[in-house]
Image: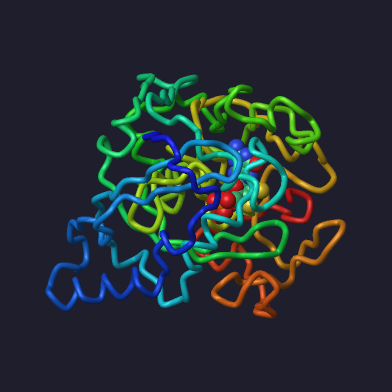
Amino acid sequence: MLIKKPGSSHIKEHEVTDESIYRGRRQILKSMGFVGASALLASPHSQAISWFGKDDDEVFVTSPLSFNSVDKYKSDEKLTPEAKVTTHNNFYEFGTGKSDPAAKAQGFKVDPWTLQIGGLVEKPLTLGYEDLTTRFPLEERIYRLRCVEAWSMVIPWIGFPLASILSEVKPLSSAKYVAFETLEDKEQMPGQRSRFVGGGVDYPYVEGLRLDEAAHPLTLMSVGLYGKTLPPQNGAPIRLVVPWKYGFKSIKSIVKITLTDREPPTSWNRLIPAEYGFYANVNPKVDHPRWSQARERRITTGGLLSRNRIETKMFNGYDEVAPLYKGMDLRRYY
Ligand code: MTE
């Protein structure tokens, strides 16, 4: 995964594929009859992508993935260009600036990797690096990701439903919640060494879902985006994507999943409980105490300062999750 940097000191944006090229290649494949509902695809990317970190002397290489294209998760929405998805990130373990993760995470080692799934389950499971992309069939799913900071992206993720893991480990009837934990490694993650660099978060970063939320078909364990394995700044080698919740629920670089009978602590709720609740469902009617959540800036090709503002939808537009919260006061359970 890691090779030494041959002297350059910047991420080369021309080395990452723009979404129009990505879609264009898929269109060509489609016209040749290769892309259909549930057709097994080789990645449209013929080559691995190299990342050159600004502040380290190593290169992270992502690899093409094979995946199913599922009609239900296609979208006509304009995709956020890959170059933006991979350079505008929140990953406080590598610093609080949006460009810090892409600049500082390129030496991150993801192989070997161990993901342990245990707690209140019949059959605990341990997955190694290779298992992450081979054990469960991979799908491409285009999801909107709405950050609590009121920007959003549209991203072609590759992954498998968390439900696939859950049905394998068989939760006990006492299991009510699922807790997630990011890698703790002070040597590799500068934000874990210093409260200043890491934004005051108490590491390891932790998150949680109710069991029915975790088992919902939309909840994705992602191992890639734009046809290739995840770059470190997006949470390599495996991260969660919960598209109807604010982005901070989508925890990155996961090493542990634990089924529990109690609501697990979550990093942002622990840090600022008045601003970040356990549920964190996208909700235009419940403002953040310091800003409105009624609208969002969709990051497309217009640059980060573009005025491309749109109305935020309840549950980020994923209405099928509404039954999970029937009868709940979502102002109280924010
Ligand atoms: N996971 C870890 N371990 N550390 C983080 O700082 N940031 C969260 C989430 N997962 C974060 C994390 C936040 S605030 C957001 S908005 C999303 O990751 C951003 O994901 P992206 O960079 O892939 O867009």
**Name of the residue lying farthest toward the front:** 7
In the image, taking residue 200 as reference, residue 111 lies left or right, namely: left
Against 63, residue 156 (above or below) is below
Q: Is residue 43 left or right of residue 100?
A: left
What's the residue at 49%, 41% (across, down)? 232
Quadrant of the image containing the N terminus: top left
- The quadrant where residue 272 appears: top right
Residue 125 visible at all: yes
Question: Looking at the picture, how far across and down is residue 56, in whole percent?
Answer: 56, 37
- The colour scheme used here is rainbow
Q: Is residue 66 above or below residue 59?
A: below
Res 248 seen here: no
Q: Residue at x 56, y 59 (%)?
A: 145
Q: Position of residue 69 (x, y in %)?
A: 27, 61
Tell me the residue at 59%/70% (across/down): 299
Image vertical order of residue 190 relative to residue 89, above or below: above
Given residues 195 and 178, the one toward you in this image is: 195
137 or 11, nearer to the observer: 11
Q: Indicate the quadrant where residue 238 lies.
A: top left
Work out which residue is located at the far left of the displayed protein and give it. 33
Please give the name of the residue rendered at 74% of the width and 51% of the height, measured from the top-left corner.
334
Relative to residue 244, is residue 6 drawn left or right?
left
Picture coordinates of residue 70, whole percent (x, y): 28, 62
Answer above or below: position of 263 versus 222: above
Q: Image quadrant of residue 71?
A: bottom left
